[in-house]
Image (tube, helix red, strand yellow):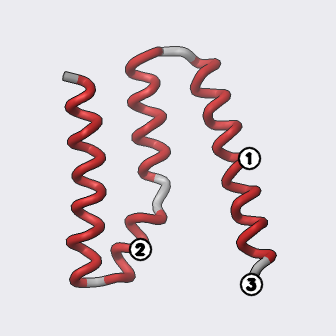
Amino acid sequence: MFYLLKIIIALVVIIGATELSKKNTTLAAILLAMPIIFFVSFTLIWEESKDRSLISGLIQETTMYISVSYTHLRAHE
């Protein structure tokens, strides 16, 4: 049942972005750029495991990769 919830959330975000992009690309880009995926993923992982160290490690690594990606993209402007 929990796996089905994950699939439904992913489908809602993906379908919402594709349908929104047909009407307003700016709003679709904002939806895709929002960290909603991070928060939903962290919440679902927390609900499954209740493991603080797992969530902490995931947040630290995600932050590190986001900062590296941002730095890389800024260097190529």
Q: Which residue is mark 3?
A: 77
Few, some or many C-alpha atoms within 10 Å of disc 1 (few <14, some 14-19, many ≥20)? few
Cβ–Cβ under 8 Å for marks 3 and 2: no
If you read the primary sequence from the N terminus, does the residue marked by circle 1 or circle 2 appear first? 2
* Residue lying at the far top of the rendered structure: 50
Q: Nearer the viewer, mark 3 or mark 2?
A: 3
Callout 1–callout 2 Cβ contact below 8 Å: no
Disc 3 secondary structure class:
loop
Residue 29 pos. (x, y %)? 41, 74
Residue ID at (59%, 18%): 52
- Residue at x-position 26% and y-position 27%: 3
Q: Residues within 10 Å of mark 3 (few under 14, many from 20)?
A: few
- Other residues around mark 2 within 10 Å, as few (<14) / some (14–19) / many (≥20): some
**Given the image, on which type of amino acid does mark 2 rest?**
Ala
Identified at 40% across, 41% down, the residue is: 40
Q: Which residue is mark 1?
A: 64
Q: Which residue is mark 2?
A: 29
